[in-house]
Amino acid sequence: MAVLVIAEHDNSNLKSSTLNTITAAKKLSDDIHLFILGRNIGELANKSKDIHFLSKVIKCDNEKLKNFLPELSAPLISNLAENYSHILAPASTFGKNLLPRVSALLDITQISDVIDIVSNDTFVRPIYAGNAISQVQTNQKINLLTIRPTSFEKSEDSGGDAPIEEIPFVDTDLKTIFINREVSKSDRPELGNARIVVSGGRGLENSDNFKLLYELADKLNAAVGASRAAVDSGYIGNEYQVGQTGKMVAPELYIAVGISGAIQHLAGMKESKVIVAINKDLEAPIFNVADYGLSSDLFQAIPEIIKELDLLNQIES
Amino acid sequence: MKVLVAVKRVVDYKVQIRVKSDNSGVETQNVKMSVNPPDENAIEEAVKLKEQGLASETIAVSIGDEKSQDVLRTSMAMGIDKSILVKTQNTLEPLAVAKTLMKLIEKEKPDLVLMGKQAIDDDSNQTGQILSALLKWPQGCFISNLKIEGKKVSISREIDEGIENLETSLPAVLTCDLRLNTPRFASLPNIMKAKKKPLDIIDIDSLGVDTTPRIKTLKVIEPPKRKAGVMVSDVKELVKKLKYEAKVI
Ligand SMILES: Cc1cc2nc3c(=O)[nH]c(=O)nc-3n(C[C@H](O)[C@H](O)[C@H](O)COP(=O)(O)OP(=O)(O)OC[C@H]3O[C@@H](n4cnc5c(N)ncnc54)[C@H](O)[C@@H]3O)c2cc1C
Ligand SMILES: Nc1ncnc2c1ncn2[C@@H]1O[C@H](COP(=O)(O)O)[C@@H](O)[C@H]1O
């Protein structure tokens, strides 16, 4: 049977989490449909049909879908559900906000944050902030899964040629009015799928000092991340938080600066390939997961690292 | 306005989790248990609404075994007026929790339901969304700011891109992020007072909800351990290792 993937996008481009979710879908079926709900998504649908391995793109295009309110999208998804063995969405705030509503409408228990697919009915997911890994099985007639993007590669976004089908919008009575989104603009790579992430914690002491971290990030073409303590203290916005209640990241290189390494933080970054910890406290638990630890004052270490990187660049050019 | 808060009893966030040797689950015997952290924010917000004169009554509900009475006592020590324990020996899936809450909501008729955004044991992040869909009430998830004026509800919710601001109306279901407020500590006099506040215990069977599990846990294992790394002596060595050993820069 076919598998339905719910696209995460901004009405003009797919988020990379959608491509990760398609890769997860490939483990379940050769017949994968992508469902795009939004406004003025004609061009987006046209681009999406090129994605390798898709056999259909379904779109629902309506002014009211512009802001992705889950009350409106969920019924449109559940109306299609009976044609599918599995419905997948990324385990991002988008997917987390939406898919449980589909679960309610279909009376099916959703499996959250899947990191591995063992078979069509058996899935692996972390519990207790990743301190335990649970393998679960279900025999429901439709499987609802949110997929942790960092656990699956991105699928190719070219090489395919899927037909596009449009379905009509069906309205739902809704009292919620969308006001706005406060989105910070940055030229740095996106935190969720950057090759290098430089994260700062309470050790940075204030938002001004975070500039030091931005400078390092820019030298490395890295994304910036933060601990909850740094966000709570107002050094940086919530969209940068890494951890159990923030974003999951798994870059090739994660540099934790002035972060102690609480389990809730580790939950979001311990799948990184190489971890560097810079902390002046030798006892900090972050060193237990670090491949390279530097016990030093960050205000000394970071400018030095920037200098070393400049030197390296000079040698290379 | 009547406010209902859902409170789950979970392994305390500071406890080092141990997987049972038979791989059937996580050890919860003889470990410290607490109110699920974001549920404390939900409690705090409800108590604040009462203090501001916006809420007339606040009720905490927990679904679990007898021991869950302790998180309800804590809720009442923080200022919640009364509480209900729905007693069950089973661990319920989010869908079943939402259905159970719905039964109580039909009875208690609150105007606002506040819950945590996620339980830190199962990390499901589903129950509030499901409940909102079942009740056909507006949903506001992962909120870090709340303002209520009459029936109008203004919220800021934390999303991957930043903050989203929505306006909706009561009745509504809202799930709280840790940044919504700073939960108060229960003072000793308030802990004493909470002992006298009403705590109803009802059996889940009396509600007639289907709570049959849909998902079977085959096994629970420990996560793979990272192999031990090295300490470097200075920045030069660090940069060299990253460049020539790990080859990541
Ligand atoms: C339910 C729940 C969910 C949570 N979710 C998350 C989450 O998603 N993400 C998250 O990060 N946290 C989360 N937390 C919080 C977590 O428990 C920790 O409190 C938090 O991660 C600590 O942040 P920190 O390491 O920046 O601060 P601290 O623990 O205060 O550590 C600061 C570190 O900086 C070092 N330092 C200070 N000055 C310097 C200097 N000059 N040079 C070098 N080092 C220095 C110190 O030695 C210390 O190790 C959660 C907590 C709860 C209860
Ligand atoms: N057994 C329970 N009793 C009371 N509230 C619960 C229970 N399980 C979940 N909740 C509520 O639902 C929220 C989200 O839980 P979850 O969907 O399991 O991550 C929690 O923060 C609680 O507010």
Image (cartoon, helix red, strand yellow):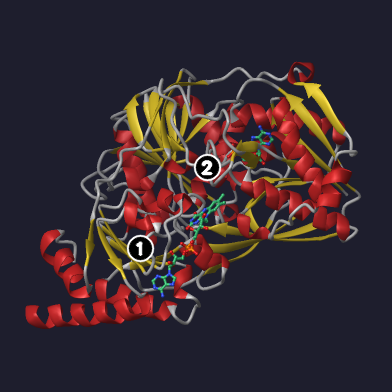
Judging by the rendered image, the residue that carries numbered circle 1 is A282
The image quarter containing residue A201 is bottom left
User: What is the number of callouts on the image?
Assistant: 2
Residue B234 coordinates in the image, percent (x, y): 22, 72
Q: Considering the numbered disc 1 on the image, is that residue within a helix, a strand or a loop? A: loop
Residue A281 coordinates in the image, percent (x, y): 39, 66
| Camera-side mark, 2 or 1 | 1
Can you see residue A165? no
Question: Which one is nearer the viewer's eye here, A211 or A138?
Answer: A211
Tell me if residue B55 comes above or below residue A163 in the rendering.
Answer: below
Crowdedness of circle 2 by 10 Å Cα count: few (<14), some, many (20+)? few
Label 2 amino acid? Val
Residue B247 coordinates in the image, percent (x, y): 14, 61
Chain letter of disc 2 in the image: B
Horizontal relation, residue A82 to residue B198: left or right: left
Crowdedness of circle 1 by 10 Å Cα count: few (<14), some, many (20+)? some
Question: Which one is nearer the viewer's eye here, B246 or B164?
Answer: B246
Judging by the rendered image, the residue that carries numbered circle 2 is B15
Label 1 amino acid? Leu
Can you see residue A218? yes
Q: Considering the numbered disc 2 on the image, is that residue within a helix, a strand or a loop? A: loop
The structure residue drawn at horizontal position 24% and vertical position 48%, both measured from the top left corner, is: A156
Horizontal relation, residue B101 to residue B20: left or right: right
Task: Kindly indicate whether the residues beneath marks 2 and 1 are on one polypeptide chain.
Answer: no
Residue B56 coordinates in the image, percent (x, y): 91, 50
The structure residue drawn at horizontal position 46% and vertical position 17%, both measured from the top left corner, is: A139
